[in-house]
Image: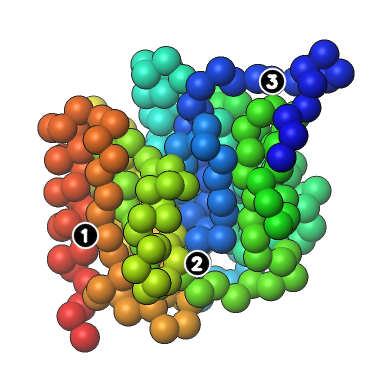
């Protein structure tokens, strides 16, 4: 893939290093080498009273909005502390984003508005493509390989990140065993958010369980009691990652062993 010439695009944003990217947890998104991904159901976009209320009832949407907003803001602040930037995006054909908002333009608008409300930069929209493409007139690349018309998910696991997100190379290591693709959900700031009172421990646990419920609802054959995986990239202080891991482990322990 050829990068664009910055001189030809005066409003182009060029990032010299790694960026943190707030994304949908979708298993078919692929990321460029300069991306660390932090996943969330539908990128955290919600609409009330619409779509599949059995899969994602309004009470769960409000939890996603509350905790998801804290996650986005805290990741943005943490990225700045680490000398990088946190950006928000969504992707073409997202069934979770905004819960059945129809059409890319409407979903883009909803993502841009959410990012603006949170005070986090909006990157742009991840398109369906066969190979990585540049997003939002930047040098950040990503694509979703599943056709926009297809809403069948085939993930077999959920990776809960606890130590600083996950890269495409790290996802590939998980998926190299051939068991199946992985949804990606960020638990990287939950322990810190509990400590400072931004969210409660119950909210954090229910937020993580919400992602398991969504995954179970959109994927046939997912075995909930074996699907959850915890990944520590080692990019956060060990004590912080350990506190996040404990939260995820306690949530996983609540899954019925059937």
Q: Nearer the viewer, mark 2 or mark 1?
A: 1
Question: Residue drawn at (51%, 21%), measured in percent from left and top?
Answer: 17
**169 over 129 or under it: above or below:** above
* Gap in angstroms between the C-alphas marked 3 and 1: 39 Å
* Secondary structure type for disc 2: loop
* Residue 194 visible in the picture: no
**Neighbour tally class for label 3: few under 14, some 14-19, many 20 plus, Cα within 10 Å:** some
- Camera-nearest residue between 154 and 25: 154
The quadrant of the picture occupied by the C terminus is: bottom left
**97 over 122 or under it: above or below:** below
* Secondary structure type for disc 3: loop
Disc 2: which residue: 56
* Secondary structure type for disc 1: helix
Q: Nearer the viewer, mark 2 or mark 3?
A: 3
Q: Position of residue 110 (x, y in %)?
A: 69, 44
Q: Tag 3 or tag 2, which sits nearer the N-term?
A: 3
Disc 3: which residue: 13
Name the image quarter holding residue 115. top right
* Gap in angstroms between the C-alphas marked 2 and 1: 19 Å
The quadrant of the picture occupied by the N terminus is: top right
CB within 8 Å, label 2 to label 3: no
Q: In the visual, does 135 lie left or right of 217?
A: right
Q: Nearer the viewer, mark 3 or mark 1?
A: 3
Question: Residue drawn at (65%, 60%), measured in percent from left and top?
Answer: 145
Q: Tag 1 or tag 3, which sits nearer the N-term?
A: 3
| Mark sitting on residue 251 | 1
* Gap in angstroms between the C-alphas marked 2 and 3: 36 Å
* Residue 183 visible in the picture: yes
CB within 8 Å, label 3 to label 1: no
Q: In the visual, does 137 lie left or right of 139?
A: right
């Amino acid at each position: 893939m050829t990068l664009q010439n910055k001189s030809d695009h005066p409003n182009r944003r060029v990032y010299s290093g790694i960026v943190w990217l707030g994304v949908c947890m979708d298993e078919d998104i692929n990321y460029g080498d300069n991306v660390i991904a932090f996943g969330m159901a539908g990128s955290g976009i919600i609409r009330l009273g619409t779509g599949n209320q059995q899969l994602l009832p309004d009470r769960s949407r409000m939890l996603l909005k509350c905790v998801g907003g804290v996650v986005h803001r805290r990741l943005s602040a943490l990225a700045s502390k680490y000398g990088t930037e946190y950006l928000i995006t969504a992707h073409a054909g997202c069934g979770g984003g905004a819960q059945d908002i129809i059409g890319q333009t409407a979903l883009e608008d909803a993502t841009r508005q959410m990012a603006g409300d949170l005070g986090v930069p909006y990157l742009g929209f991840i398109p369906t493509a066969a190979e990585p493409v540049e997003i939002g007139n930047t040098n950040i690349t990503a694509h979703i390989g599943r056709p926009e018309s297809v809403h069948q998910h085939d993930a077999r696991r959920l990776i809960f990140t606890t130590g600083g997100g996950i890269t495409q190379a790290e996802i590939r290591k998980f998926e190299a065993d051939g068991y199946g693709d992985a949804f990606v959900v960020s638990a990287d700031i939950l322990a810190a958010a509990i400590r400072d009172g931004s969210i409660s421990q119950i909210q954090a646990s229910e937020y993580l369980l919400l992602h398991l419920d969504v995954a179970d609802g959109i994927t046939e054959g997912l075995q909930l009691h074996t699907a959850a995986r915890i990944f520590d990239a080692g990019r956060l202080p060990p004590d912080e990652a350990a506190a996040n891991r404990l939260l995820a482990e306690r949530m996983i322990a609540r899954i019925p062993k059937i």
